[in-house]
Amino acid sequence: MHSGLLTRSFRKTYPVAIRGQGVWIYDADGNRYLDFAGSAAVNFIGHGDQRIGAAVTEQLKQLEFVHSSQFVTPIARQFADEVLAFAGPDFSGGAVFFVTGGSEAVETALKLARQYQVEVGQPQRTNLLSRKQAYHGATFGAMAVSGNRKRKQIYEPLLRQFEQVNTPYCYRCAYGCIDCAGKYATEVEDTLSRKGNDTAAFIFEPVSGATLGAAVPPDRYLQLAALTCRAHGVLVIADEVMSGFGRTGRNFAVEHWSVAPDIITCAKGIASGYAPLGAVIANKKVVDAISGGSGSLVHGFTYNAHPISLAAGQAVLAIIRKQNLVCCVDSSEGETGKAMKTQLQRLLECAAVGDVRGLGLLWGVEFVSDKQAKAPFAPSLQFSARVASAAAKRGVMTYPMQGCIDGELGDHLLLAPPAIITSDEIAWAVDQLSAAVNEIHYEVSHP
Ligand code: PMP
């Protein structure tokens, strides 16, 4: 049936989602799906939570919107303080800028970094450093610092080119995992030795998101990279759009390695999908440079600090706290995180699963046609997309991606369920997933 809706693909028929409850999404045909990817690492508290509806309704009754050039609101002030506190002592004296999603958060962070450098008398810092195989968003600035080839390639002629270093990827480590933390950090050092005086900021995903499928960096790498940036006067931006707000078992993933960025970007989990919301958390150094310098941001969107989104975010954070969800998600201490880790390891029994990696409730499963050689499937086989369809037929939603090896080769799934998922639900989802992987593996091996 033709619809006026411009969907992501003209070739795909999408189920019509009409209701969500807990970890389940229901479609108009009466099917239900376990949301094993939290859509795209979005939902953290579960679907259909009426407490969020109540908070949003209350805010709607009071005030739906004012423009941030004319007013502040009580909810914006309160929630900014709560988010700052959630980010921990490194951000005391800092400030939070609210936006409507991850790409806007990244644009804001990059512009904030540039303005900071201008304010502190470093206007020549017109470059940004980022990493290959990263994803930071769909807008032009965010795309320019991204390294996800498929999502970027046709727009490349319209984008500025910046320096990019490798992202640690243990399963296919560029350095054979021999002192790779130091070697990957040396790439940052080498680039900044050449470009350090011209570079405003280094942006990275602490745990890789969709592009590399939850690749976790080796210990010490992020500390070393951050130290190098500091030494060169380069701001450190942790893009925690996917990994933030508890997803990896810490409030923010950088806490696993005791790294204190200057700026954190977040979205997705901050409002768990109940409203479009993102945030940029800046430390005191950045805020002071602007407040004590020109005194105003050269940046803004109409929907900054939208009260309805903030009401959703505030209610979500209250639930994260009350239900102690971040601790539950921790891979070594929390029930949910431990269950996810243990159950997902079972997928390694499938002949087509080469690697299972991740932290907390952010996991990647990489597929190979030959385990010994770590050989990928031909991209034309669309292995991960087919596994995702087979899993959806069995009632499990996942997030399939291609290109983890070099932008073209390599198939994987991203898994990031809501934190209220039970151990039984995880076990059931892994059973379905394992059957889906074996089914597609059989199909491609017997064409
Ligand atoms: N940064 C990261 C790390 C992301 O994972 C994403 C979205 N997948 C974005 C930025 C962009 O966020 P959005 O899609 O909300 O604009």
Image (spheres, rainbow, N blue to C red):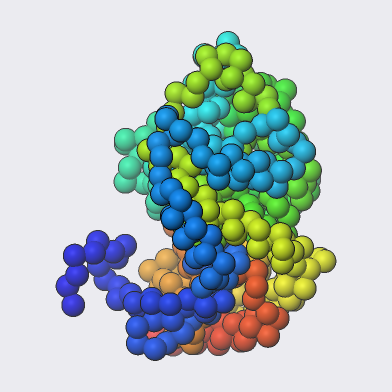
Residue 26 in sight here: yes
Q: Quadrant of residue 220?
A: top right
User: Is 289 displayed left or right of 18 in the figure?
Assistant: right
Which residue lies most toward the right here? 333
- Give the camera-side residue of 375 and 351: 351
Residue 160 % position (x, y): 40, 31
Residue 237 % position (x, y): 61, 36
Give the residue drawn at x 39%, y 89%: 30
Give the residue drawn at x 55%, y 27%: 113
Q: Quadrant of residue 346?
A: bottom right
Which residue lies most toward the top here? 121
Residue 105 % position (x, y): 50, 41
- Give the camera-side residue of 82 and 89: 82
User: Is 55 displayed left or right of 252 in the figure?
Assistant: left
Residue 282 % position (x, y): 62, 33
- From what the image shows, is residue 201 above or below residue 205? above
- From what the image shows, is residue 236 above or below residue 238? above
